[in-house]
Structure formats: C-alpha cells, structure tokens
Amino acid sequence: MSEQTLVDSNVSSISKAGLLSEQLLTNNLEERTVHKFGGSSLGTVQSIESVLAIIEQRISDQDLVVVSANGKTTDKLVEIIDLVNLCQETEDEAFTHLLLLIQAEHKQLITELVAGDSETAIELVAKLNDDIRQIQQWYLQQQLIDNSNNVLAFGEIWSSRLLAAALTQRGRAAVAIDTRECFVLDCPLKTTLDSQLSSTNLHSKLKPGQLHILTGFIAVDRQGKTHTLGRNGSDYSATLAADLIAATDVSLWTDVDGIYSADPRIVPSAKKLQRIEVSVARELGRLGNPVLHSKTLSPLKEKSIHLHINNTFYPQQLGSEVGVFGEIARQEVSITHSNQLIGFQSKRFNKKLLAVISEEFSTVDIDAAQKRVIISAEQAYGLRHYLQEQCVDFATHSMSLLAAVGYSIRDSRWHREFIKTIEKSPYPVAKVSVNEHSLVAFSYEDCQIEWVNKLHNRLTREHKNIGVIVAGTGNIGETFLSNFSAQQQAQEALNQVHLIGVMNSTKGWFDVDGLSADKVASEFSNNAQPCDIEGLLTWVQRHPFDEVIIVDITPSEQFANNYQQFFDAGIHVISANKCANTFAREALGLLQQSIDKNDCQWLSNTTVGAGLPINYALKDLIDSGHQIEEISGIFSGTLSWLFSNFDGSKPFSELVKDALDLGLSEPDPRDDLSGLDVQRKLLILARMAGFQLDLEDIDCMSLVPESLKSLSKNEFLQQSHLLDKAFSEQLAEAQANNACLRYVAKLTYIDGKIRVRVGIEALDNNHAFANLNPCDNIFLLKTNWYQDNPLIIQGPGAGREVTAAGLHSDLVHLCRQLNSKHQDVDIKGIN
Ligand code: ADP
Ligand code: ASP
Ligand code: MG
C-alpha cells in the first residue's frame, strides 16, 4: 500500500485543510499532529515568542513538537568540525571564537526567554556550560571528529530544552525528549528506523498532562552511537514521529508559508505552490532544496498523513499542502538550485560499484558513461569514506545544479523549454539529466542567482492558477457554462483558469481538482450537495488557488450582501447581479474599502446593457476628459419590446402576456413594469460617471398601479386589463402628435443642476429612441464635446447569449489583470 492511501485520504484536501484549525483547538484524540519548528523559526527571542504563541493557541498535549537547532547553530557546529578537519594554523583561535559565540547566543536566548534569575534559567545555563566544556574537551583530546555527531546533536538538545523550559515557565507543562533515547536506526546509512523498538521507546516517554518537545535531526544506532539524519533532517524526524504515534497531520513551521516556484529569497517573482505532489516534493528534497528534507516523505508513504508547510510568522495563512492531487496541482513547476554538490570520478566506477553506491547513498546523479557520481557535499563525507575503505581511487570536483521540478516534467512541454533556456543561458552546463519529475543541468561552476531567476521567469511566466465559482444556474448561468470550455481554448488569458464550483440557491458542486463545465448541465443534480452561502464562504476561505473569482449570475440580494466577505477573503467578483451596485453609497463605500484593502477586483459590466460596451464607452469618455451632460436611453429590453409593439392594435395587457409567454419578461412581469430595473441601471451609469446618487434620488414612474401591486402573480395577470384604459389614452394622445410612447431613463446635468428620472415619455416618431428593433437597448451620451451629435450605442441589451458573452468578456479582462498582478513575498525570520 502506498500512494493510493494518500489519494484516498486527500480526496477532499480542501475540507481537510478547512478542518485543521478546528481540529487543533478541539483536542480530538483521534487526530494528532506533529509540529516541527525549523531553525529559522527558533533563531531569535522574537521568533521563539511566535513559536510559543502558536503552541499556546494551536497545539494540544497529545500532539508532538519536534525542534531543529536554534537559528544557524548547526551551521556553526559544522564549521567547528570542518575547522578541525582542515587542520589550519589558526584553528585554535577560530575554534574558540566560534564556540564562545555559540555559547553566548544560547545564553542570551535563555536569559531573555526564561527569566534570567530563575532557577530554571540558572540550571539551563549550567547545562549549556557543561556541554560547551565537553566540546572543548573532545577538541583538546583530539576526539572531536570521532564525536562530530554528538557535537551536532547539541544544537537540537539546547533548542528543545529551552523551548520546554520557556513553556513550563509560562504555565504550560512541557518536557524535552532527546530522540536518541527513542529513535533507533536499523540502517544508519539509509537512516531507516527500527519502527517497533523506536515506537516502544517513544511511547514509554510520553506522559499525559504535558507537551513533549522532541529533538529533531538525531537518532542512535543499535549500539547507541549518535547519528544525524542529514541536514534539514528535523523534517524527517517529524514524519518519523508522526508515523510512530499514528498522527494524521504533520505541520512543518518555517519562515515561508509554503513551497514556492523557486526560493523566494532569491527569486522575487516566485509564487506559492498551494498543493505539491508527493513525488515532486520528494524530487525537490533529493536535489537538495532546503524546504523539505529528501527523506521527509518516506514515512508518509506508509500512512495517510497530511503534510503542511506553514509560516511561523503568519500562522493564520494557509500554507502549502503535500499530497496526491489532480491535474491542476500537477501543472506546477518549481526551480531549484544547489551549489553544494561534489562530483566523484573514478575509472573504477563499473556497473556493479555504481549499483552499490546508488543503493547505499542518496545520489543526485549517477553517470556510467562519464564514470561519475554527483552527491550532496554533506553526503560526500560518507561516500569518500566508503570509497577509501574499498581502496577505490577517485577525483572530486565541486559542482552545482540548476533544475526544474514538476510532475512528469520529462513528458511535458517544459522539457523542450528547459533545454532551450539552458542552451541559451550563460550557465556553463556539464550535463543535463532528464528524470521523470526533474530536468537537471549540472555544472562545474557555481550557479548564480541571476540564472535561477532567468530559468524561473522563462518557465513560470505562465499564468496564475485561477479558480472560478459560478453562482446561479438559470438561463444565463447555463449559457455561461456552456461557453466556458470553448472560451478556455480560445483565450490565452484563461489558460490556467479552472471551474471549481457551481452553485444555485440550495445546492453546490465543488471540486478543487476542477469540474468540466460541459458536464455541469447533465451532472449537476447528481453531484450537487446541499450548500448555502455560509458553506461557500467556509469553502473559499481556504482554497488552494492563486486567485479565486466568483461569478454572480443570481438575482439575489442576499447573495450580494456577502460580497464584503468575499473581498475580505481575497476573492474577486464578477456580477451580472445588480443588487450590490445599487447599494446605498455608504454600504458601497465599505465594499470599496474592502476591495482596496484586499487588492480585489469587482467587475460588473453586464449589469447595464448586458454585453453592450456602454460601460467601457462611458469610462473611456470620462478618462479622456469629457464632461457628461446627459445619459439617456431605453435600458430595458422588455419595456423596449412592449412599447415598440404598442401601436394600438392590441391592448397593453395582452402584450404583457405575450412578452411573458415569449420569455421576454421576468417571471413576474411587474418586476419589469415597476421600472426598478431601469432605475438601477441608470444609477449604475450615473455613479460610473461620478454622480454621487442613491436609488431614491432617481424619480421612478412605476407602470403598476397601486391596486395591482399586492396581488399574486396569477391575480395580477387576470386583472391586468385594468392597465389598458390609461395606456390607450396616453397612446392616443401621443399618436395625435406624431409621437409614440417609450419608457425612457434620463440623467441631465446642465449648469450644475442634475435631473434624473425613469418613466414613460411621448417621443417624436423621428426620435432616435423611437425606431429600435423590438427588445433593443439604446444608450445616448451627451458631453461638452459631444453635443449636437451625441454618442449612441444601440443593440440587444438583454438575452442569455449576449449577457453570458458579456460575463466572459469580464472574465477575460479580470484574468488578464490577475495574471499581471505581482505579490511580493513577505519573509520574516533569520535567514
Ligand atoms: P527551517 O529552518 O524552518 O527548516 P530552512 O531554512 O531549512 O527552514 O528552509 C526554508 C527556506 O528554504 C526558506 O527560507 C527559503 O529561503 C528556502 N527555499 C528554497 N527553495 C524554496 C522553495 N522552493 N520554496 C520555499 N522556500 C524555499
Ligand atoms: N539543525 C539541522 C540542520 O540545520 C536539522 C534541521 O534544521 O532540520 O540541518
Ligand atoms: Mg530546514
């Protein structure tokens, strides 16, 4: 059993992620998490305080905490060992300097985090001094190299002791556990555990009522000799511990909120990868990327453990999740580099020896033809030792790598792109190695930051991953969805746009791995689950996309009332729904604040004139300095049709019924006859033109007499003949003057005076508004520069196809903007 379990357990990774914080707060014994804090989270007093706060708020006693050494302690301990290995003249001085520095740093952390004059602090400092003396003694007795793993172990020992003491002093009982008392390796070279023995050992240490702080990075062999799990090995310690206690989640707390498309410290345009395939993460680790140790994922293969990478400095942010996902997550590419490689070359590297090396060591590349093995500098010690033992002569060279890692990248379009970029780049390539999930260029020269950026920009200049949720499955919603796939094919801006949810007022169908828009019509009813706006809000709060857009094709005021919450969650909105656009100015101001604060976009170009570009024309006139003097026209397709056909040959009420039968009116025709829709549209245009108005500032003539307003729809239809007398009289009067009746919206702004109204007008038969195709809309814009010859836009202003097309136009515009939006990575910490 292996990745299949991960597939099953990740079916609903988003709901899982959504549950995470709740689970942490609700002491659910079945759900245990191992939290690992890396050196970058433990380097300063301030960062350790963040860790303490996370533990306090999110970590319960049945969870485990695994810690790395504080800050760069391991680097310094490695430096000490290297000094001795190199036997330089100034060794004594440098050794003493480094050791004192390590001692001083740790002493300072103790005094600042554990009240300096307390007994606990005094005891901790005394233990630290003993340890420092021990290192000195090994040095003086020339036993330091033999004890190098014991020296390295101190980093994690000091860190776990300090955290346990600081917690205890803050009233949270905690105890440090040296994992050398539990983790027993059955094969030290491969760093695999004797699980049974290690589990028994660990469980014997776990006591109720206290939090256990385990040292990462270290273990012992069967003889009790200390071994390290390799640089960044605490990640691996955490997943090993999770395996032993059957935890459901592992959280790696570090100084970035996830795995990025490149190291965000050196590639400013790197973007967070929300979901990373296990195989891709493993490959990143194998190539030496520090964000995940190469072995971290091996214990996960056996059990369904979810792995998250979280940011200690922004704990509320949703980090990356490592697991097995669908196509969308598999399209991500990450660039990594390392200058810490050693190439071993030997004439004696025959097939047999290379097979043994491959079996025993984590190599980065083995090349039988070149008789060369490339391995991390860290692992090189072991290989060197092994080859010497086997009396194999070899030469070594420093090497570097620059790689693109992605799911099945070998068989993807990235392969050619990578080769082309590498060929053109100044990175002096010694060899390109093509693997299933990685393309690696090796060199004998260091890889420069500039080259990493170049490759990254070339391979990831692609679009963002954008999730789209469609709310509303009526006529327009259906048409919008039926055109979705064709648009995705046709529009470059939609390359990485995925339909991830469709909902109506009672049900929703969501899938972070994407829905096929073509199947929604036939499969929605079978797949949709009961869902309300609350459910949607919870779901979108923790989505794994770079951006999410909600397309509101509902007529619902209740839905529009949630826009603020969408914007607060960083979600963008495209609305055909006019409700929010016509909120009172105060409420609209709050929406705008939320949009600005969260860097969101809200497009609603179909709310007036459906697909007609009236909004763009108006914006363009304003941008180019025109002063608007009149906005007028016929804004309702239904009223346009009714009055175009109202020539006296048929009573008005009969035409109303015809419009209903032909599907040209709202289900209740009074919604059109009330004029509210036209009033709203005029308000939207007026506000766009900069006039500070509210709905009640616009005079609205309703065509529904008081007596018919409160009837049921059927009663209204039965009694609609009551409309006819008044309409016939008005028509007769107009016709006597060579005029016709039209329902007109009109804003005028002359000499600083504004007049806004919607209602019936008698217009000369030659008037521009008098000769429309039935159903058409017409918009007239008069400005200081367009006076006698105003700008007119005329055409179908309603209908499912044109409205859906207008929404697609908004989607393309929005995606273009989002694709060019750059977010700087905010990094705190010590590195
Ligand atoms: P910790 O001390 O928490 O174990 P590390 O320093 O080992 O953290 O690893 C985190 C660092 O990894 C980040 O600060 C970042 O500079 C580096 N890094 C390299 N590549 C990536 C990547 N693709 N995504 C995120 N971080 C990366
Ligand atoms: N302290 C060790 C290192 O720096 C282990 C770890 O941080 O994961 O590599
Ligand atoms: Mg690390």
Image: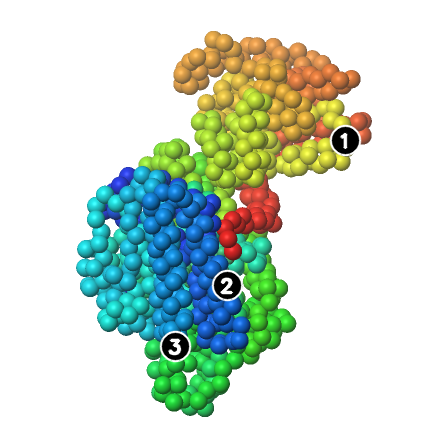
Could you tell me how far apart the alpha carbons at marks 3 and 2 are, in whole angstroms? 28 Å
Q: Is residue 181 visible?
A: yes
Of labels 1 and 3, earlier in sequence is: 3
Vertical side of 489 occupied by 658: above or below: above
- Residue 578 — which label? none
Residue 751: x %, y % from top left: 78, 17
Say which of marks 1 and 3 sits in front. 3
Contact between marks 2 and 1 (CB within 8 A): the answer is no
Residue pointed to by mark 1: 626
Q: Left of 801 or right of it: where is 739?
A: right
For disc 3, the marked residue is 382
Task: State yes or no: discs 3 and 2 in contact (Cβ < 8 Å).
Answer: no
Q: Outermost residue, top direction? A: 707
Q: Quadrant of the N terminus?
A: bottom left
Q: Is residue 752 left or right of residue 231?
A: right
Q: Position of residue 367 (x, y in %)?
A: 45, 82
| Kind of element beneath mark 1 | loop
